[in-house]
Image: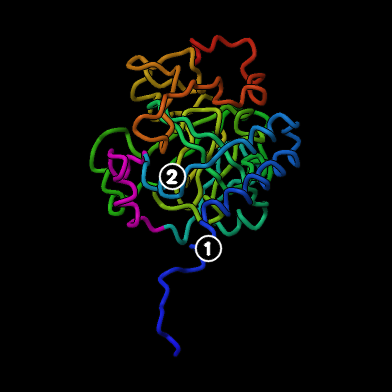
Amino acid sequence: MAHRYTSDLTWADVTPKALYLNRRQIIAGGGALVAGGLAGGGLRAQQEALEPNTWEEITSYNNYYEFGTGKSDPADHAHRLTTQPWSIQIDGLVDNPGTYTLEDILSEVEIEERIYRLRCVEAWSMVVPWNGFELADLLNRVGVQDGARYVAFETVMRPEEMPGLSVPVLDWPYREGLRLDEAMHPLTIMATGIYGEPIPNQNGAPIRLVVPWKYGFKSIKSIVRITLTADQPYASWNASQPGEYGFYSNVNPNVDHPRWSQATERRVGGGLFARRIPTLMFNGYADEVASLYEGMDLAEYF
């Protein structure tokens, strides 16, 4: 007799989605880096050794103060954010300034899969499988003029959709900046997805910056404006508390935050009794990016 037994399992239970995607992205991420001329065997092996955090950990433990300062506030409130339609104003020292729709931007780039370490300035960390494209591809498309030395970014500001904006934690909208050579580095990507899915609102939908060798707050979310400048741009945390948050904010275990050590980190998902792990210089990407800061005093330019 039919229908005597009804399973509550679905195809998603056959192979856990996270495990399936992890394996697929480890392979693809390593290949993408090699294709970009970045990785020798060392970085590819490093990528393959990374074990991403779960979807639940990545999407439920967030800093996105526009939705609240609690770690669960973004997941609770970010559903209010309207992400379609979306456009980015690109201006300043570029040959082709204008307002570009997200569809227009994505039509000219190739989405890759990258698995990167994420190190928060608060001394916790994750490993995140991003989907995105190199920022350099977008900047080359709009044409960077000779006088440009920095790139400024700005997050969307919609008080009616972002309840955290009612609290003056920072001078809203949230703004960040990179040196031009940092922005053009192959490791710097604009992310549009996680685990092969569209990026969730609490993680910075529909498009955000990811700079894996810097503390997480440099990787600004939900970007609506990119400006090429000759002078170092305003950066929200740096302007608010310059003694605690440097403009560069490169991950550096040798330069402590004034209120806590940066020598070690707590891996989210490691369990209550998991040991803290040593933090790596430039978050483990020293071979790729240390040359950008050759000759600089990294304690002064933290």
Residue at 64% across, 38% down = 48
Residue stretch in magenta: 63-82
> Which marked residue is nearer to the observer: mark 1 or mark 2?
1
- Residue annotated with mark 1: 14
Q: Amino acid at mark 2?
A: Ile
Secondary structure state at the residue bearing disc 1: helix
Asked where in the image residue 136 lies, by quadrant, the reply is top right
> Which mark is first along the chain, 2 or 1?
1
Q: In whole angstroms, how far apart are the C-alphas of marks 1 and 2?
A: 22 Å
Tell me the residue at 29%/51% (across/down).
Answer: 76
The x and y percentages for residue 1 are: 44, 90
- Read off the residue under disc 2: 58
Task: Give the residue type that dot 1 points to.
Answer: Val
Question: Please, is residue 206 above or below residue 185 in the view?
Answer: below
Q: Quadrant of residue 261?
A: top left
Q: Is residue 292 found left or right of 77 in the rendered image?
A: right
